[in-house]
Amino acid sequence: MAATIKDVARHAGLSIATISKYLNGGHVLDANRVLIDLAVAELEFKVNGMARSLKTSRTMTVGVLIPNLESIFCTSIVSNVENVLQEFGYSTLVCDYRQDPVMERRKLAFLADRQIDGLLMMPLGNDPELLEPLRARNIPHVLIDRPVAGSDCDTILVDNLNASYAAVEHLVVQGHRRIGIIRGPQGIHTAEERLKGYTRVHEDYNLPVEKVLIRNGEYRTEDGYGQMSALLDLDVPPTAIFVTNYEMTLGAVMALNERNVRIPEDLSVIGFDNHSLTSLVKPPLSIVVQPIREIGEMAAQTLLRRMRDDRAGFPILCRMKTQLLLQASVGPPRTP
Amino acid sequence: MAATIKDVARHAGLSIATISKYLNGGHVLDANRVLIDLAVAELEFKVNGMARSLKTSRTMTVGVLIPNLESIFCTSIVSNVENVLQEFGYSTLVCDYRQDPVMERRKLAFLADRQIDGLLMMPLGNDPELLEPLRARNIPHVLIDRPVAGSDCDTILVDNLNASYAAVEHLVVQGHRRIGIIRGPQGIHTAEERLKGYTRVHEDYNLPVEKVLIRNGEYRTEDGYGQMSALLDLDVPPTAIFVTNYEMTLGAVMALNERNVRIPEDLSVIGFDNHSLTSLVKPPLSIVVQPIREIGEMAAQTLLRRMRDDRAGFPILCRMKTQLLLQASVGPPRTP
DNA sequence: TTGTAGGCGTTATCAA
DNA sequence: TTGATAACGCCTACAA
């Protein structure tokens, strides 16, 4: 059916070896070059990737394993990763494991079995043994957004602690003393770090941490809604609030709107991620902006380097800085 | 490095052919079965997919081409598709083309070149010639959510027209006469159909269609916000509004909250997609619920059938029904 | 039931 | 620069 190198060789009156060499960047006589180009065009020849892979043992495919295909943060990163990799001829095998540690293992094994050339992943678990299948098969891999404790591994993430620190500190500097935080899931690295930033500010400024102001969420919209509502229902509600991911920020904003809380008069708000939210709400929301595009690109580029056996600086730990985008949603606390 | 069938054969004291046969479901003597299982386990043997693919000319990989990796509708479908396909041993090569017709062609060609066994796509363009690369290579494919005019092609979509009809009709029955709609992009099939449902109801009930109540959006959150605001700014605002996708519904809700519009007293609202929104807003939002999971599963299953050369009923046009989830956001218009 | 051997389409080695 | 040829790891008649 599809033309093979053999066909091209016949068509051009040359040998298979010559065609192959030319196709892979080798030099041939100009006259032959023309001949080959012609044959390739006429026969609509495309190299057979499987045959090539069999020989070279490279599939030109990288796996991407993420916790959730329905989180905008994850998919934005995938989108940027994909864009970089594609430029270099790589395809991406995307899997999500639906936040399930068992599925995480399964899919990782699945991907490892598929002879991927490399893998990018946002791990859920913190167990270095998780990465064993990759080690065993010598598959280069880069972690995104979350480290795995005690594993030598290139890791691209965000300085969550200081991101959070900066946000909360700003609130403190504005004069706030009762600051609520809607934190992410226990055990998830980003969530713990963002919480640490919050407590560290309190330490550094000698402020008491009130447990009731620390609310647990699972990074879902409904958590933001529910916990925001709960905070507002407190006898003494906070004067400022920090919400630690996009989906929860969305939910929190809805709760605020619903109750006609005036911002920033009644409550100062700092959210997380995603610019478009910012402009939608009135007054414009202050947010912690993650360099999503840079994360994706850096991860992809690091993996590309590893896949071409450039081990420079291994293991890289890239801790990207966030930006605190301040807008009208933050002001001084109401003076009673 | 990795063990091959040859190694297994040696280890088990049998021939390569026997091992291969057993691995592919053939029968061998019980004694040998044990031997082989043991060898496979000890050597941690995994079949080499490339070698197998080279022989069988099947890659066990399907491409998934979507307009946008940042739209929850798209990624939810991908997630469900992936889940079904993975059960059958297939991987999914996910690409988004960022709503760009040029990139759509490029990525399609890219995928076709990668010897995928099949493809699922949500097309942007309506040009049957778009699918040529697939035809040329005989790659089974199934369209999702949007048809391509004049192309014989299995297509899984939603009965957008009647989905919209039901929503708008319900508003009319409630007594509304000035009903706004925030429509999707021109030329996109789903958007046109949803608009048709709106106009058809007006025809069927002999109601005039007011151009000013038909607002253009591009399916983005900010469009929902902007157009909702514009509608509220009209001298005579509508008494009810129908928003035609998830992202725009989100934006519209924000605009409503911001202005403290009372729902449904001042305005009845019907949105689109995604349950979680519903419960977040107060009062609970009425929405058109698309059977996202079913769409993904049906598309995957149809493709699976085609990939095993089951041509039954080709070309299938599966028009799934939506559900109108009515809640307190809809009521009769205010009587002036 | 088991084994032998040829071939899938490339790449890579080594002579010519 | 070009060409003959042997892998790559697996599947599959066909023969035993």
Image (cartoon, coloured by chain):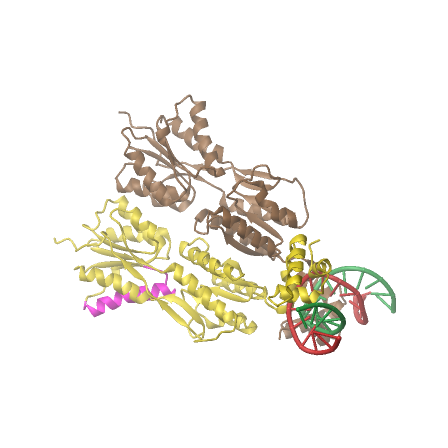
Chain colours: A brown, B yellow, C green, D red
Q: Quadrant of residue A334?
A: top left
Q: As drawn, which residue projects farthest toward the top?
A: A206
Q: Residue at x 41, y 44 (%)?
A: A275
**Residue range corresponding to the magenta coloring:** B183-206
Is residue A214 at all visible to an observer of this figure?
yes
Q: Quadrant of residue A274?
A: top left
| A248 relative to B306 in the view: left or right | left
Residue situated in front as seen by the camera: A106 or B153: A106
| A240 relative to A194 in the view: left or right | left
In the depicted structure, whether residue B59 falls above or below residue A116:
below
**Secondary structure mainly formed by the magenta segment:** helix
In the depicted structure, whether residue B130 falls above or below residue A283:
below
Residue A139 at x, y = what percent?
63, 50
Residue B127 at x, y = what percent?
45, 70
Q: Residue at x 53, y 50 (%)?
A: A65
Residue situated in front as seen by the camera: A100 or A56: A100
Q: Is residue A65 magenta?
A: no
Residue A215 at x, y = what percent?
37, 35
